[in-house]
Structure formats: structure tokens, C-alpha cells
Amino acid sequence: YLSHSLLSFIPTLLDQVEASLKKVENRRNPNSTQSKDLNCALSSLPTILHMLTSRPLSQHALSVINMDQLCDILKMVPGIQSGDTGLGSPALVEDTLSTLLSLSEICLPHMTCEQAVPTIGNLCTCQGDYRGVAVQLCVRTTERAVHVLDTAQLSTLYTQHVLPVIQEMLLETPPLPTLALRIVMPLLCVLPELPLEDHGIVTALVELMKDVDPEEGICLLMLETLATFMTASHVDFSWLYTIGVHEQLSLVILKLGVSTNTGEATILAAVKCLSALLNYIMSVVKKALQTKNKSSGEEILRSSQCVVNTCGVLLVWYHYTTAPSALLSITQLYGGQYKDFLTPYNVDILVESLKDTDDNRVKTTLKILKRIISTDPVLLKSMIASTKDQLNRAILAVKANFTHFGAALRRSIQAFTETQLRK
């Protein structure tokens, strides 16, 4: 009976907490009267927390709490931690912050998303361990919000309250960057046009790529986030070049290529990023050819030279669905500049792929081989000298599967084997 009677006092207790905190908001040194009021009011917070965590009382306690009022109280947390809202005693500050964050953990799932998102965005501006707790709560809130809110509400709330603090999280020590990406990725899946670049998030991602360990889970999250962003229609690739995305992406792919524990999902995300980049390069080159603006085509090819370094890795990844198309784009763009990667082992990968019964894969492989051996006569001679047995097996592999291919592909194979490989 006594416990249930106390429940009726929760609104009054929260009124006292809010009133006492507002009196010292943005005031570092409260006077003696204010300090007394604070001590009296804030001492009730553990009692409220106890009722919220007590199984018999929790539902009733939640029902009597004014969530708007609690949001107003929680918005003062960063100021309390920084000292802008002074409580007078360091011990009181620690106790109050700990209790308020525990209250937020319990109550946030019971708030509307319109209440929860601004509140948690504000809590994420805390520092140290408190920020870590707040960011974890933000991850959970986001998982709920993407399923509850429509895209317009989601975009407005997160653009105003959460995106402005993501950049700083990405540049913090682990695990904050991983948690930040777990906030951004679900949002991008439903809001591909989210203006990440306006809040420094893409720039922070590029910085993160410089030191990322390819075997850590954050590498997959980082590449998936970047891939989703780069394939959105609004992306300005010329701006991406100014922050060095092409260079850092190439370096990450090279790191993944030498790692022994690179997962399939990470590989597919990396190739998706590279394919988006190559599509942009191809579009600029095509436009330059159409407008006879030779300098712009040469400039993009020169600045994108680093992608050629990924050829060896793409050959190792050749059995993955999207790798052949990316390799074909590079061979079409850069002629014989990739010849250093045409080791007997790598050529053998191309030869083995000709045994595939997938028409599109074989056709892509034939285009790559044709481009390779038609680019440079010197390269052709050296290839034939070092990989004669492999080229012979290529012809046999093609002939073995000849009847499985469509008529158009059979004609392509016939022309390829007779006029190119037999030279």
C-alpha cells in the first residue's frame, strides 16, 4: 500500500527536480538556498528509479510519468556534466548523472520517437563513459525509429538532432565509431538521400579508413555505409575526390587483399564502393569523348590512377559476383597499365572462370582477356610466352562449354579463340 501511495507522488517529485535544476541552469555556482533545494529534490531520483525497476510497480510508475517533462530534465544532463549547470557537489553530480541516465534507459522505449530522438541526440553530446551509454541508447532508439516514423519525420528529426554529433563520434576511440555507424547505416537504408556530407560524416569516414584494421567488424560497417552512400543519386563524386575517397578506398582494398580473414560481406561491400567509383569515372570519360573535351577525360583518369592497383585483388576475388565487372571497367579505362598484375597465377584465375556455365560471367571474362591481349603487342608476346599452357587450356575450357552458351556468345567465343588466342 505504501509503495502504491508513493507512486502518486512521482509527478510532484519530478516537478521539484525540474524546478530546482532550472534555477541553476547555466549557472556554475549555485547559492546556498539553491544548493539546499537541489539536494532535497535530487535525493528523490533514486526513489523514482527504484519504483521504475521494481517489477510490481514499474508499469504503474511509467504511466504516471510525464515523458515531456522527463525529456526536459534529461536535456540538462550535458550541462550538468560540463559544469555549466552547477550542482555544488562533485558527488551529487556523479550520482545525479548516473541516475538520470538509468532513468533514460528505462523510459526512452516508452517515449514517442518525436520525444526520444531529440532527447537522445542531446545526451550524445556528453563526454566520457556517459557518452558511451548515450550512444548505445541512440542505437536502440534508431532501430525503433526506422520502423515507426515515416521517411519525412525520420529525416527531419535525425538531421536536426543526431547527425550533427555523428562526426565527432566517428573520430573518437572505440567502440564509439562502430556505434556511430550502427546509427547511420539503418538510416541510410531507408533514407539514401540523407545529407551525410553536410555534417562532416563522409569526411570522418575517410579519416577512419586510413587506420582501419580489415579484420575488425568496423571495416564491414564502414564499407557498407560508404557503399550505400556512394550509390545514392545525389552524391557529388567530384567532391568525394577532393577528400580522397578514391585513394583511401584503393588502400583499404589492398589491405583486404592481403588479409586472411576477409569475409564475403566485406568483399562485396568493397567491390560495390569501387564499382560506384568506376561508373563515375566511365561517365566522365564518355562525356569527355562526346564533347571532345580531351583534358577532362585525361584529368579524371590521371587522378584515379590508384584504382589500377586493385586489379590483383580483384583477380583473387574474381569468383565473387561483382568483381569481374569492376575488373572489366579498369581494363577498359586503363589499357595496358595493369599488366604488372598478370602473373601466371592471376591469368589462371581468368582461365578457370571460362569453365563457368554462366553466359554473362564468361562473356565478361572474354572481354577482359580480349582487352588485355589487344592493348599492347609487347604484352601479348610476353603473355603468350609465360602463359602458353594456360591460354591453350582457356581454348579447351571455352570449347568444352561451347554448346551451353547462347548463339551470340558462341559467335563471340569463336571470333575470340580464332583471331586472338591463336596468335
Image: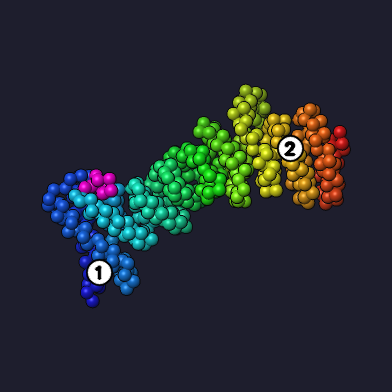
The answer to whether residue 361 is magenta is: no
The three-letter amino acid code for the residue at tag 2 is Thr
Residue shown at the point (24%, 44%) measured from the top left: 84
Secondary structure beneath label 2: loop
Highlighted range, magenta: 79-86
* Residue that badge 1 annotates: 7
Establish if 123 lies above or below 109.
above
Q: Nearer the viewer, residue 405 or 331?
A: 331
Q: Where does the image place residue 296, in percent across and percent down from the top left?
A: 61, 25
Establish if 202 lies above or below 147.
above
Q: Where does the image place residue 131, in percent across and percent down from the top left?
A: 36, 50
Instruction: Kindly tell me whether residue 258 is visible in this rendering.
Output: yes
Establish if 213 lies above or below 420.
below
Q: Indicate the quadrant containing the N terminus: top left, top right, bottom left or bottom right.
A: bottom left
What colouring method underlies this structural image?
Answer: rainbow
Q: Furthest residue to the bottom?
A: 1
Q: Residues within 10 Å of mark 1 (few under 14, many from 20)?
A: many
Give the label, 2 or 1, closer to the camera: 2
Residue shown at the point (27%, 53%) measured from the top left: 94
Secondary structure beneath label 1: helix
Residue shown at the point (32%, 73%) measured from the top left: 56
Q: On the rendered structure, is 342 left or right of 165?
A: right
